[in-house]
Structure formats: C-alpha cells, structure tokens
Image (cartoon, rainbow, N blue to C red):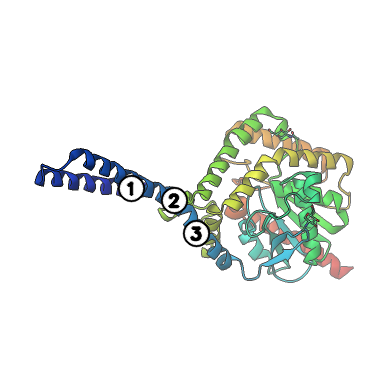
Amino acid sequence: MRRRADNQTINKDHVDGDKKENVERPQHDNSAKGKLSIGSWIINMGKCLLLIFIVPPFLNYASLQRERQMLLPKEGQIVDIGLGQTMHLLCKGNGIPVVILDAPTGMSSDVWFHIHKDLSSLTKVCAYDRMGLGFSKHLIQNGTTETERTWGVSTAGRMVDDLHRLLQAAEISKPFILVGSEIGALNARFYSHIHDVQVSDLVMIDPIPEDIFEELLWREFWYGKLLPSLQAKQFSAATGLSRMLIILGILEPTVTGPDVSEEVTQLQKYLLCNPAHQSSAVDEHYFMNESAAQVQDISKFKPLSSRTPVSVITGDHFDREVPDQLNQMVAKLQKKFLEVSYSSANHIHIKGADRRMIYKEPSAIIQHLRKLVSRRQANRFSA
Ligand SMILES: *[C@@H]1O[C@H](CO)[C@@H](O)[C@H](O)[C@H]1NC(C)=O
Ligand SMILES: *[C@@H]1O[C@H](CO)[C@@H](O)[C@H](O)[C@H]1NC(C)=O
C-alpha cells in the first residue's frame, strides 16, 4: 500500500513539473509532450508493477534461504529417510521410553515447544516436521514415490510411512509413546494399529473423528471456509505479501504469547512467509478426508492391540472460533469412534481449552504425559 502511495506522489510531481514547463515555454509542441508523458507514464507503471510483483517475491525468496540456515534448531537433525527425501527431527533429553510428538494439521514441530522442553527433563522427546512442512523438504526431482502412489500425496498413509522410515533411520529406541494432535492423532492411530509392537502408549489430542467428512456441514466449513483461508495464506506467502504484512505488524504468527521464545516467534514468521510450508499445509487439509477414510479402514480391518493403552485429551470445544454446531458435531463423533474402536481409553478433559491447548494451555497435557513416562520407567525398574 505504501509503495502505491509513493508512486502516486512521484507521478504527481511529474505532472506539476510538466505544467511548470508549459507555463514557462508556451510555444512548446504539445503533441510531442503528450507522447513523452505517456511514455514515461508507461515506464513508471512498469517500474511500479516491477516493484509490486517481482521484487517482493524475489526478496522474500532470498531471505527465506538465509533464514532457513539461521533458524534450523541446533539440536535438530536432517535425516535421510531414503527415496531422496530428508526430514527434520528434533530430539531433546535422554532416556526411555522415547516420546514422539506429531503436530496438528498443517503445523510444524515447534508448536510442541512447551511440552517438548518440559518432558525432556524426564526422558528423550522427539518432534518432527512432516514432509513439506517446517524443515522437511518435499522430494522434487522424482515426482511421486511408491508410497505416494499407494496412499496418495499428503495423506495419513504416506505420513505414517515417512514417520516409520524416519524413526528407523534415526534409530529411535522402541517401544515409544506416540502422541498426536488432529491429523497427528490420525497418524498416531494408523501407526499404532499397523506397528503395534513399536508403540507402548497411544495419546490422541483433539482427534479428528474419522467419519466427520460424511457430514455436509463439516465439509462446508472445511472446504468452503478453512481451506480458502489457507490458500490465501499460501498466495500471500508466494507473492511476498506476508513478509510485508509481518514487517508492518499487520500479520502475526499463530503461536504467540508471553511464554513463547524469540526463536519460536522468528520460526513462525519464517513459516508464514514460506510458500512451500504453506502449500503443504493446504495439501494436508485438502486430503484430510482421504486420511480420515484410510484410518477408518485400518480401524475396521486391523483393530488396535488390546495391550496398547490409549488416552484421549480434549478441551471444552474443538475450536472456540467455529460455530457451536460444528463443535457439538466433533464431540458427538469423537465419543462414537472412541466407544467403537478404543472402549477402554482414558479420557482426559481440559476445562476451558480448545485445539490451541498444545501451545496455549500445555500444563494438563504435560502432567498426563509425565505420568505415562514415569509409569513406564517404574515398570521397567521393577521388572
Ligand atoms: C527416480 O525415478 C527413476 C525412474 O523412474 C528411478 O530409476 C530412480 O531410482 C528414482 N530415484 C529416486 C531417488 O527414487
Ligand atoms: C475427498 O474430497 C474430494 C473433493 O472434495 C473428493 O473428490 C474425494 O472423493 C473425497 N474422498 C473421500 C474418501 O471421501
């Protein structure tokens, strides 16, 4: 906006200048003058378009390259998981059982920062970026891989396959406690059903019920409201607009608050400006119905082993910013799938919380996870 305004004043100066010249030299050929000013107007317009459409994306791209190097966490590893793909894994602390954290839909591993830090005083805790998000890069050179052909791009099946290869490559000790939120919870379910000996405990935070995409009202919300807003963010990142809006203080990162470290804030800003991250966030949302359908099938044909304890953590609402009707729908369908597939699950309700609890109100989640870890550690020593 500011650029446009500047340009207008530049044009105005020119017009004033022209007028002055005309007054001083009345004999001057007017038609040539007209052509000249149209020419310079076109040149100015060209410069203006250049400024608006070429320079910001270019500057944004250049800044992203630099920021990526700077912001990559020091303890973070870039793990080669085969097929030419690399994933970002961030582990803190020592000990077993390892806790694996799988982030909500379209989010990167840094949303876990409170939980990650706190739990790492007790045991080894690892968070990772799903393919395309954060510091995990999509395979570009070879299009679709075998698993993508089997499961589809950006679906739970593909993500679970990636996670499995990541944990294998990084030699994470098993069994581990698997914690996931939203799509992370779908992934955690999928993983626990298939690789049951690797998972000692399954923890779902705000799980998306697998049959919710059968509801028209939910589909209208998801594909009609949520997805377009994410696509707008992707466009804004690609054009460099997000960077300008952040500089002007108009656009703020999702994860904010007094307890959020400067590092996380910078990383969140980087991700807002990063078109690759935003595009993967859009894909995860777009294919969420497929992911849900895959998990529905897995739950039916390969139920969870009865030896795996399950806990579910939810707040008062799924999302306090969406209409009540949608929240009630999520709650009803969550109750149903838990009764059908995980009848002995331990349900923890956090008063006043919604899906933002991971970074806004993490204390109850931390308390529960600490209990799970301590119980496993005590069992180990007594065995
Ligand atoms: C890429 O594809 C080609 C042929 O489709 C295959 O031979 C090659 O191994 C693939 N590379 C990777 C890294 O998957
Ligand atoms: C998911 O949604 C897309 C587009 O709305 C549709 O084409 C596809 O069939 C849906 N998939 C499932 C499993 O419902």
Callout 2 amino acid: Leu
Q: Is residue 154 left or right of residue 26?
A: right
**Neighbour class for label 1 at 10 Å: few (<14), some, many (≥20)?**
some
Do we see residue 311 in this rendering?
no
Name which of mark 2 and mark 1 comes first in the sequence. Answer: 1
Taking depth in this image into account, of 164 and 32 the one nearest to the observer is 32
Mark 3, residue position: 258
Q: Is residue 208 left or right of residue 62?
A: right
Callout 3 amino acid: Pro
Mark 1, residue position: 44
Mark 2, residue position: 245
Residue displayed at 82% across by 38% down: 340
Residue 160 is situated, as x and y percent measured from the top left of the image, at: 78, 52
Residue 270 is situated, as x and y percent measured from the top left of the image, at: 54, 58
**Closer to the camera: disc 3 or disc 2?**
2
Residue displayed at 47% across by 58% down: 59
